[in-house]
Amino acid sequence: SYVLTQPPSVSVAPGQTARITCGGNDIEIKSVHWYQQRPGQAPVLVVYDGRDRPSGIPERFSGSTSENTATLAISRVEAGDEADYYCQVWETTSHRSGDRHVVFGGGTKLTVL
Amino acid sequence: QITLKESGPTLVKPTQTLTLTCTFSGFSLTTSGVAVGWIRQPPGKALEWLGIIYWDDDKRYSPSLKSRLTITKDTSKNQVVLKMTNMEPVDTATYMCGHTPLSSPEPYFDSWGQGTLVTVSS
């Protein structure tokens, strides 16, 4: 089964840029979506289709992909960005049947020092 | 404005069937391309996708849970129902539903319910 690998934690000082990676086989050909989840709250979509931002999400949040790795970058990090971040893709279960399913990464806890 | 809210039992016994309802507003599940998905999150753990139902009644399920899951919709009530059979303590989690917009060929969830915590215990 398809696996998305995220580092368990990333730490960054305020004002710096945080980069959260999501590794997966051939991920560069998939649409990668990213969610922010603050403690006790539901996830919030911050990037979809690799690099697009929903309305209301600051330009500080950006997404990119390269060979086997997708990255969520958060520039000018603020205390309010401290949260868990999850990547997500849509994966083929069976090429024969065409069945597909959603896969989430294991999540990365962003700590603002 | 899109809103979703999950409802159902907070406690179920092992071997029982869980039935949860997602009641939504701000969109119609008769609109082409729209879908509602279910996602769960055990305490302190990562998100886990359960399944999704589309406007045309197409359904997809988690391969590991497919035999236990059924998702249905009632468009007249703006509701989506999740049934999970043979519940076990490891199924203890917050269960959430999410809206997938019509613009997404590879689905994502742009609105989420707050979730409901379901505990499985005798």
Image (spheres, rainbow, N blue to C red):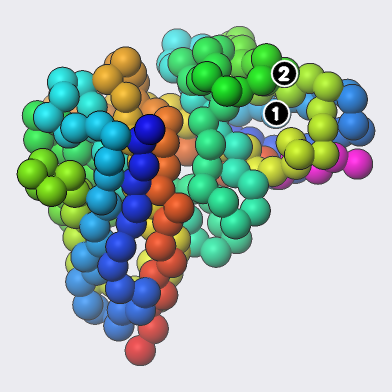
Label at residue B121? none
Q: Look at the image and say whether residue A67 sits in the magenta stretch.
A: no
Work out whether residue A44 can be spotted. Answer: yes
Q: Residue at x 33, y 18 (%)?
A: B104
- Where residue A16 sits: x, y (%)? 88, 24
Count numbered badges in the picture.
Answer: 2
Residue tagged 2: A60
> Which residue corresponds to the image point at 30% horizontal and 73% vertical from the top-left?
B9
Query: How far is disc 1 from disc 2 in space, using C-alphas?
Result: 13 Å
Amino acid of disc 2: Arg
Residue A20 is marked as 1
* Mark 1: few/some/many CA within 10 Å (<14, 14-19, 20+): many
| Residue located at (52% from left, 13% from top) | A52
Chief SS of the magenta region: strand
Q: Where is residue A2 in the image (x, y as percent from the top left)?
A: 42, 33
Secondary element type, mark 2: loop
Amino acid type of the residue that numbered disc 1 sits on in the rendered structure: Ile
First reached walking from the N terminus: tag 1 or tag 2: 1
Q: Is mark 1 on a helix, strand or loop?
A: strand
Q: In which quarter of the image is the C terminus of chain B?
A: bottom left
**Front-lying residue, A39 or A25:** A39
**Does residue A93 show up?**
no
User: Residue A111 in magenta?
Assistant: yes
* B47 lies above or below B33: below
**Residue B28, horizontal then vertical, whole percent:** 19, 32
Residue B42 versus residue A27 in the image, above or below: below
